Amino acid sequence: MNLEAFADLLTPRGQRALAEAGELTAADPVAAATRLRRTYDAALTSAALTQARLRDRARAKFGADAGRMYFTPHGLEQATRAEVAAHRARRIATWHEHTSREPDRPGPRVVDACCGIGGDLLALARAGCTVTAVDTDPLTAAVARANAEAFGLPAGVSVADAASVRPEEHDVLFADPARRTSRGRTFDPMAYSPPWPVVLDLFARARLACLKVAPGIPYEFIPGDAEAEWVSFKGEVKEATLWKGPAGVRRATLLPGGHTLTATGAEAPAGPVGRYLYEPDGAAVRAHLVGEVAELVGGRLPDPMIAYITGDTAVDTPWAARYEIADAMPFSLKKLRAELRRRQVGNVTIKKRGSAVDIERLRTDLRLNGDNSAVIILTRIVDKPSVLICNAPPPA
């Protein structure tokens, strides 16, 4: 879809084509295209069908809003999940309220330096921010503008390079640099677009700033004057966010519950395997808060280099999944298979940290047979390959 085809999609005729395409998302693509071509030209047919399918895919991130939004394939891939964007937008609005030099002004002026299709722009505007947004790609900027207009939200979107943004003229800088290249997803901040040095320059010049980055960002790329927050949604780490604020603070946040945990300097002791195993949420692991989680559950590390915690008492915490350990043994395929057969285990959930074992190959090699279920934890204990057999948790 090019800019001309997208503009056609926004006309009354294009909206009719899009509505008809939305009713055909489950149909065979060739049959759907053939049906639309009876009324519309090839370019509009292609644009409408593409947009309808993107909206269908976008429901996982945007819920009901997806049915009114517009997307590009790359923009949807990069876009923040709505619940995560709303959390970040609320923090920005509250953060500005507490630090504003003009307390009577209703909301912060935010510049979105690489807005993409506008998912964060929508969240910021809904949180009461006045948003000015730019993107280097004309089509992407047009999509963002259309999304703001679809919900009647005030936002100015223009085509410009992030390097041209003047963060000094706004209350808050927000930037979500693209993390995909022509070869696919990149984990190297120097390959972001705009490149990391440009992003850091904007960050340094802003009074308040918020950067969305990949969860696996190397610590050496985190500015010294930044708070680093890792956000998990329903147990899956979604992003890291760098906030220009208290230097060196590390935070993990769990959504949708809104639980937050910050570094206190707690260090988890090492010790023998207990009755229960605790698997810390990935956001806590990324934020190097395993010691803090161990303190919450009164646990210890069977191996000081592995982020599994064990303890002797059952403690409920949103920060870790808990499993009751039935057996712990050095890893041996033959012995593990024999033990699972003895327990009549026919279904296993396999987890691992610090293990080189291929999970799918192991699942095949176990040749399971039985009516019972179990959770298998592959790990190291005092640097030795080990396996923990845990009772399957009750259904949620």
Image (spheres, rainbow, N blue to C red):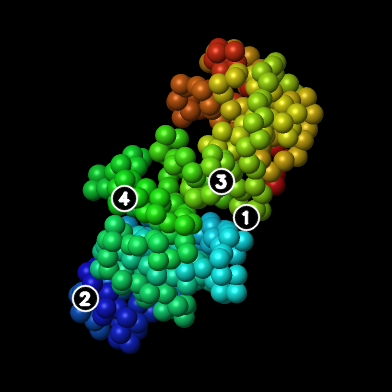
Residue 256 numbered mark, or none: 1
Task: Tell me the distance, in whole angstroms, between the alpha carbons under discs 3 and 4.
Answer: 22 Å
Q: Which residue is mark 2?
A: 4
Query: The residue under label 4 is which amino acid type?
Result: Val
Q: Is residue 131 above or below residue 358?
A: below
Q: Is residue 129 above or below residue 362?
A: below
Task: Tell me the distance, in whole angstroms, between the alpha carbons under discs 1 and 3.
Answer: 25 Å
Task: Tell me the distance, in whole angstroms, between the alpha carbons under discs 4 and 1.
Answer: 33 Å
Q: Earlier in the sequence, mark 3 or mark 4?
A: 4
Between label 1 and label 3, give the one nearer the viewer: 3
Residue depicted at x 60% and y 19%: 304
- State the image quarter where residue 30 is shown: bottom left
Q: Crowding near pointer 2: few (<14 within 10 Å), some, many (20+)?
A: few
Query: The residue under label 3 is which amino acid type?
Result: Pro
Q: Secondary structure at mark 4?
A: helix
Q: Is residue 272 above or below residue 277?
A: above
Q: Earlier in the sequence, mark 1 or mark 3?
A: 3
Residue depicted at x 69% and y 16%: 271
Q: Earlier in the sequence, mark 1 or mark 2?
A: 2
Q: Earlier in the sequence, mark 3 or mark 2?
A: 2
The image quadrant where one finds the N terminus is bottom left
Residue depicted at x 55% and y 13%: 383
* Residue 78 placement (x, y as % from top left): 38, 55
* Residue 224 placement (x, y as % from top left): 47, 40
Residue 246 numbered mark, or none: 3
Which of the pair 55/40 is nearer the observer?
A: 55
Q: Crowding near pointer 3: few (<14 within 10 Å), some, many (20+)?
A: few
Tell me if 392 is positioned left or right of 79 in this view: right
Q: Secondary structure at mark 2?
A: helix
Which of the pair 59/81 is nearer the observer?
A: 81
